[in-house]
């Protein structure tokens, strides 16, 4: 495996109190060892928004957010340039077919198109990936 598709739920679990598990950390270790994490163009916005919401709920501080972002910036992360051009076609069709939000379908479409495993904690997204035979990380929750 040289690449995986990284959903924000996994990355956020590394930094939010009470959400990190040994299984989630396996994904982080793979990326730290050089496996490239593929992300759609919305990923950075989703992660930033979730961190800001965690700040507002006093789960983390601004310093914690800054440290999380600095840590993520060091990882081999590659943004998919095709997300926007596929939003109104392949991604929308996949969202309809699998009864997902477009925001979730973008990760599934990317994993399918690139032939990678999908790293996510989202139950609906995992169910759709299993139905379409897309490998999952962590393999079990």
Image (cartoon, rainbow, N blue to C red):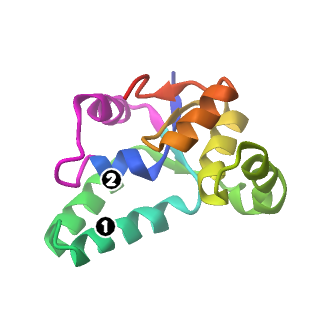
Relative height, residue 136 to residue 65 (above, below) = above
* Residue span colored magenta: 14-36
Could you give the CA–CA distance between mark 1 and mark 2, rounded to whole angstroms?
A: 8 Å
Q: Where is residue 33 in the image (x, y as percent from the top left)?
A: 33, 29
Residue at the image position 67 percent from the left and 28 percent from the top: 131
Image quadrant of residue 140? Answer: top left
Judge whether residue 79 is colored magenta: no
Residue at the image position 17 percent from the left and 65 percent from the top: 64
Q: Which of 101 and 69 is in front in this view?
A: 101
The residue to which callout 2 is attached is 12
Judge whether residue 25 is colored magenta: yes
* Label annotation for residue 51: 1
Q: Which residue lies furthest to the bottom in this view?
A: 56
Mark closer to the chain start, 1 or 2: 2
Relative height, residue 11 to residue 53 (above, below) = above
How many numbered callouts?
A: 2
Q: Nearer the viewer, residue 89 or 41?
A: 89
Q: Where is residue 105 in the image (x, y as percent from the top left)?
A: 66, 50
Q: Quadrant of the C terminus?
A: top left
């Amino acid at each position: 495996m040289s690449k995986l598709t990284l959903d924000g739920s996994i990355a956020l679990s590394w930094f939010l109190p009470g959400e990190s598990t040994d299984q989630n950390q396996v994904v982080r270790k793979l990326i730290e060892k050089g496996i490239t994490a593929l992300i759609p163009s919305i990923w950075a916005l989703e992660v930033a928004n979730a961190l800001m919401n965690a700040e507002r709920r006093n789960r983390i501080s601004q310093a914690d957010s800054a440290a999380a972002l600095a840590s993520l910036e060091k990882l081999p992360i590659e943004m998919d340039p095709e997300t926007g051009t596929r939003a109104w076609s392949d991604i929308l069709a996949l969202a309809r077919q699998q009864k997902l939000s477009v925001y979730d379908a973008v990760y599934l479409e990317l994993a399918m198109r690139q032939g990678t495993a999908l790293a996510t904690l989202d139950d609906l997204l995992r169910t759709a990936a299993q139905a379409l035979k897309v490998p999952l990380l962590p393999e079990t929750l």
